């Protein structure tokens, strides 16, 4: 049976009402030209604390950003209540392009990438010389991640009052990585703090390290009293430290243009996301020698041109050894 008459017009056509009462979806997104720039300093269960000018503002990510997540160090555009007062909430509407991204995976066979920090300039790899024992394979992995992300590495060796740093420094001497050696007494007196601060001035530095190496203790010594965190201890049975930092946090370095980003202690640093071909860029003395390498060369095979490049005196053999050791980190476990 015909529902409408023979001569119908648009007013006769029934329309299904919008039960939700909201506006229809559209691909047009607001530009938010009035948005103010801020920097993400902490992320906690969907709430992001951002530094806007001289005040801390709590914000949440706008739905229009989709699944794209903001991390500590991100520059973001924020709208809404920017007063920073209690119980106020702003909205992050845009994540600005990143200058660098430090990533890691849980394991080498885990394809899921975890962004550690964004827009950092430097990666400080904190390692204890004893209690717990140093883990060179973990250091290697952090170095590979730093080179892949375009960050400058810095080796920070703690607890030198318990063991000598000479053997560990000899292992990384050919890489030319800058380093700072500290002891507990020097941290208490402030002597070591001054040496570390010289390496951090004017840079955004992310601190990473195995649990119990004294990373948070060092960060506490670098920042003002009101921003300090509690420190843990090393289990005498397992030799493992307790996590005292549960989420990344960016802290301004007093009296400097630099920033310190304290990250949770790690027990693994997967490199599934790293393309080995990019690691060679951190070795400018070896990179020209790869022009004669076969296609898709792993730089650790009989036909690799780097062997002849080093034999001709263009680079130190220890540099080639260091490169190959780093490239092999994905084939070895971190406890080796």
Image: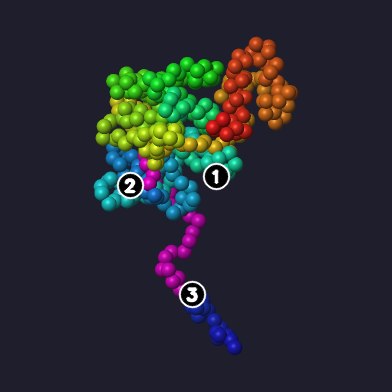
Q: How far apart are marks 1 and 2 (CA)?
A: 28 Å
Q: In this view, does 184 lie to the left or right of 291?
A: left
- Front: mark 3 or 1: 1
User: Colour scheme in the image?
Assistant: rainbow
Quarter occupied by the C terminus: top right
Residue 17 covered by magenta stretch: yes
The magenta segment is 15-44
Q: Residue at x 50, y 78 (%)?
A: 14
Earlier sequence position, callout 3 versus callout 1: 3
Q: Look at mark 2 in the image and give the residue it sits on.
A: 58
Residue 138 covered by magenta stretch: no
Q: Which residue is drawn at 72% across and 29% down?
A: 295
Q: Look at mark 1 in the image and give the residue it sits on.
A: 112
Check disc 1 and report its element: helix, strand or loop: loop
Q: Which residue is drawn at 55% across and 85% down?
A: 3
Between 47 and 37, the one nearer to me in the picture: 47
């Amino acid at each position: 049976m015909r529902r409408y008459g023979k001569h119908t017009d648009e007013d006769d056509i029934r329309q299904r009402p919008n039960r939700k009462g909201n506006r229809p979806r559209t691909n047009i997104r607001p530009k938010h030209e009035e948005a103010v720039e801020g920097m993400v300093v902490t992320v906690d269960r969907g709430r992001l604390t951002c530094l806007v000018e001289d005040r801390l503002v709590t914000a949440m990510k706008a739905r229009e950003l989709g699944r794209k997540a903001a991390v500590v160090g991100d520059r973001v555009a924020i709208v809404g209540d920017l007063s920073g007062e209690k119980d106020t909430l702003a909205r992050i509407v845009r994540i600005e392009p990143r200058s660098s991204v430090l990533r890691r995976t849980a394991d080498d066979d885990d394809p899921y990438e975890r962004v550690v920090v964004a827009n950092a300039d430097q990666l400080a790899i904190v390692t204890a010389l004893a209690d717990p024992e140093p883990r060179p394979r973990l250091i290697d992995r952090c170095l590979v991640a730093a080179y892949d992300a375009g960050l400058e590495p810095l080796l920070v060796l703690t607890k030198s009052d318990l063991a000598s740093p000479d053997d560990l420094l000899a292992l990384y001497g050919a890489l030319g990585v800058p380093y700072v050696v500290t002891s507990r007494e020097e941290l208490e007196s402030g002597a070591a703090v001054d040496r570390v601060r010289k390496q951090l001035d004017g840079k955004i530095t992310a601190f990473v390290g195995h649990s119990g190496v004294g990373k948070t203790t060092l960060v506490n010594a670098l920042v003002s009293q009101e921003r300090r965190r509690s420190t843990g201890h090393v289990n005498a049975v397992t030799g493992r430290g307790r996590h005292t930092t549960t989420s990344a946090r960016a802290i301004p370095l007093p009296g400097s243009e630099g920033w310190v980003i304290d990250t949770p202690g790690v027990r693994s640093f997967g490199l599934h996301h790293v393309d080995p071909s990019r690691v060679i860029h951190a070795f400018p003395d070896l990179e020209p020698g790869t022009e004669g390498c076969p296609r898709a060369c792993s730089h650790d095979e009989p036909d690799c041109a780097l062997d002849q490049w080093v034999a001709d005196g263009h680079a130190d053999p220890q540099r080639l050894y260091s490169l190959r050791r780093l490239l092999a980190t994905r084939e070895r476990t971190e406890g080796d």
